[in-house]
Image (tube, helix red, strand yellow):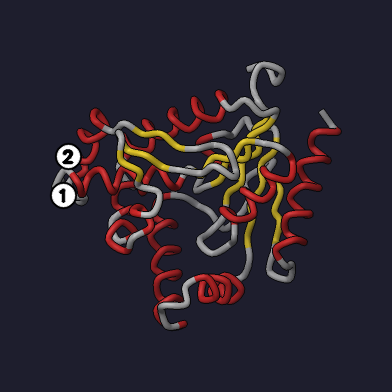
């Protein structure tokens, strides 16, 4: 595909608690780019499956739910929303019952194939000169041809500390167990802790939020200038 036909594609991958969602949105805002949270689609499909009273462990039934999955998402960094049909599910997809089944949903091959195509379509349609797309396996499966591919990572300790700071309603032990469980579940689906060829690693273990944003922007600017 011609790089002049579509927005500059910035793909950002990384484990749970690495800050990829908040960093990606902030980077998009700073550069005037669109922003696409791919994980929201898996969560929205999980919401749709539960709303249809489908067993999330039944792979065939989950794949069948794709036929009625009417999904829209806001790609403006400051106008983010997630809808299934006419229902705004922006907050609902972050509920614990969704988190409990989303990994099972994501393991269904038909789901990954369908949503991967959906992500590519949404990303190409943003009106901005670039789009920051974040989530699991973005750099390897969804957009291996992206002009900029970044693995945003941090040590398990740093990720746990950040997640604990975000979720004040749960104990540090609970947060740690959830993070480890998420890492285990994700690792069954995709290799996410080491960068593939051509992917730049940004380790935010010793960086604060603003420094992490600057590091990512620097990678993007370097790639842009070399094209």
Query: Residue visible at 52% across and 47% down?
Result: 135
Residue identifier under label 2: 61
> Looking at the picture, how far across and down is residue 169, in whole percent?
41, 77
From the viewer's side, name the closer residue of 46 and 196: 46
Query: Residue visible at 68% across and 44% down?
Result: 29
For label 1, count other residues whose C-alpha is less than 10 Å away and answer few (under 14), some (14-19) or many (20+). Answer: few
Taking the view exactly as shown, the residue that stands out farthest to the right is 225
How far is disc 1 from disc 2 in space, using C-alphas?
A: 7 Å
Task: Tell me the element at label 2.
Answer: helix
**Residues at circles 1 and 2 in contact by the CB criterion of under 8 Å:** yes
From the viewer's side, name the closer residue of 205 and 40: 40
Residue identifier under label 1: 55
Could you tell whether 178 is left or right of 143 in the image? left
Tell me if residue 154 comes above or below residue 152 in the rendering: below
- Where does the C terminus fall, quadrant-wise? top right
Query: Residue visible at 63% across and 49% down?
Result: 24
Which quadrant of the structure image shows residue 205? Answer: bottom right
Tell me if residue 156 comes above or below residue 150 in the rendering: below
Tell me if residue 194 comes above or below residue 11 in the rendering: below
For label 2, count other residues whose C-alpha is less than 10 Å away and answer few (under 14), some (14-19) or many (20+). Answer: few
Could you tell whether 20 is left or right of 3 in the image? left
- Where does the N terminus fall, quadrant-wise? top right
Query: Residue visible at 31% across and 31% down?
Result: 70
Q: Which of marks 1 and 2 is nearer the N terminus?
A: 1
Task: Tell me the element at label 1.
Answer: loop
Could you tell whether 116 is left or right of 22 in the image? left
> Looking at the picture, how far across and down is residue 112, in whole percent?
38, 38
> Looking at the picture, how far across and down is residue 124, in whole percent?
57, 25
């Amino acid at each position: 595909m011609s790089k002049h036909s579509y927005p500059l594609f910035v793909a950002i991958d990384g484990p749970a608690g690495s800050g990829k969602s908040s960093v990606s949105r902030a980077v998009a805002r700073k550069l005037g780019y669109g922003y696409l949270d791919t994980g929201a689609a898996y969560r929205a499909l999980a919401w749709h499956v539960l709303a249809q009273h489908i067993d999330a462990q039944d792979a065939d039934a989950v794949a069948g739910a794709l036929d009625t999955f009417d999904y829209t998402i806001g790609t403006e960094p400051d106008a983010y929303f997630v809808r299934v049909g006419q229902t705004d599910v922006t907050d609902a997809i972050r509920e614990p019952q969704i988190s409990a089944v989303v990994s099972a949903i994501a393991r269904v091959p038909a789901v990954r194939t369908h949503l991967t195509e959906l992500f590519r379509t949404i990303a190409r349609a943003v009106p901005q000169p670039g789009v920051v797309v974040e989530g699991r396996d973005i750099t390897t499966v969804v957009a291996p041809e992206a002009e900029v591919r970044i693995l945003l990572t941090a040590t398990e300790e740093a990720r746990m500390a950040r997640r604990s700071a975000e979720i004040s309603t749960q104990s540090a032990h609970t947060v740690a167990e959830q993070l480890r469980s998420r890492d285990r579940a994700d690792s069954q689906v995709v290799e996410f802790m080491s960068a593939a060829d051509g992917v730049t690693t940004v380790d935010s273990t010793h960086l604060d939020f603003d420094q992490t944003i600057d590091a990512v922007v620097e990678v993007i600017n370097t790639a842009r200038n070399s094209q």
